[in-house]
Amino acid sequence: MKLTPKRLQRGDTIGIVSPSSPPNQESLERSYVFLEQLGLKWKLGEHVKDVNGYLAGEDDDRLADIESMFADPEIDGIICAGGGYGSARYADRLDYQLISENPKIFWGFSDITFLHTAIAKYSGLVTFHGPMLASCVGKDTFSELSAKLFRQLFEPMELHYSEDISPLRSMSGGVVSGELTGGNLSLLASGIGTKFEIDTKGKILLIEDVGEEPYRVDNLMNQLRLAGKFADAAGIVIGDFADAEPKKKPSQSLENVLEFYTASLGKPVVSGFKIGHCEPHFAVPLGATARLDADGKTLTILPGIE
């Protein structure tokens, strides 16, 4: 059974957590202006400023911050400061029952994909794949469209993506509806063979990534193929693959790699969505019902909140 979080209202309080790597504190502080514009207050997790090498503090502390935000009745939603690496290190100890009993907006992407998948599997909560505070909102590159997509947290709204936003390419035609799932390709691949392996059966799978050369994307796509994730999926949404230029020559193109693994599936596949490590970043609710029209090159997603 899917749980949908309650919508936000002006005056509500957002909990800010750092589930993975240390966020840039200056960028995080700049993002508060945007929260103020949304009419929101915020509360920092106790360990948001902790640094433990490439981790934002100890695993136990990052875990405790997430659980305390879900448990705190004064917190109305949770937005991640940034991604990086580290959320999978404590996913097996997260209290999913607590999350089920306190369903709230949970927003982030990149390394947060591992938590999105885990929460969906063990709590049934719709979560949001969207731009984070320090890594996106607090930067000069944060776009008007990215900002507008936060409105989906305040009022139930149907999202519609077409070529009015960016050029799209149909790798394989058809029309399909199903639950939207997925996120960062590297994190999806890292969950294969664990209790947090993504379930794509009958669902529309979203994939995106950053900093992976074509041969690495090939490796990750093949891992999902061998695990049956493409065969199980009803359709595939290919988001942004930033900084994917090959450093090793000769190389296949990224487009060729993606086409190799998806074009012959006989199900709707569309690439070119500005979803991922990009601007604009089109935020989407994972777990919500979506309709992918690969013939008309559109993606429509139903509201992810009550």
Image: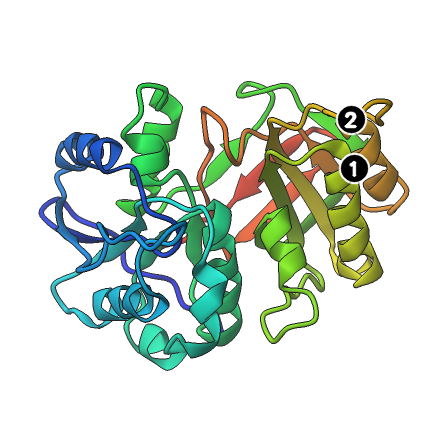
Per the rendering, the mark at residue 248 is 2
Kind of residue at disc 2:
Lys
Question: Of helix, strand and loop, which one carries label 1?
Answer: helix
- The residue located at (47%, 66%) in the rendering is 89
The mark closer to the camera, 1 or 2, is 2
Q: In this view, does 269 lie to the left or right of 26?
A: right
- The residue located at (51%, 59%) in the rendering is 114
- The residue located at (76%, 56%) in the rendering is 224
- The residue located at (74%, 41%) in the rendering is 216
Residue 83: x percent and y percent?
Answer: 42, 46
Q: Can residue 124 be seen in this view?
A: no
State the residue position of label 1: 215
255 is higher (above) or lower (below) than 75: above
Residue 205: x percent and y percent?
Answer: 66, 51
Res 227 → quadrant: bottom right
Check disc 1: other Cα within 10 Å, few if <14, some if 14-19, many if 20+.
some
* C-beta proximity under 8 Å, tags 1 and 2: yes
Residue 286: x percent and y percent?
Answer: 50, 53
Residue 77: x percent and y percent?
Answer: 25, 56
Kind of residue at disc 1:
Tyr
* Number of numbered callouts drawn: 2
Q: State the residue lying farthest toward the right.
A: 264
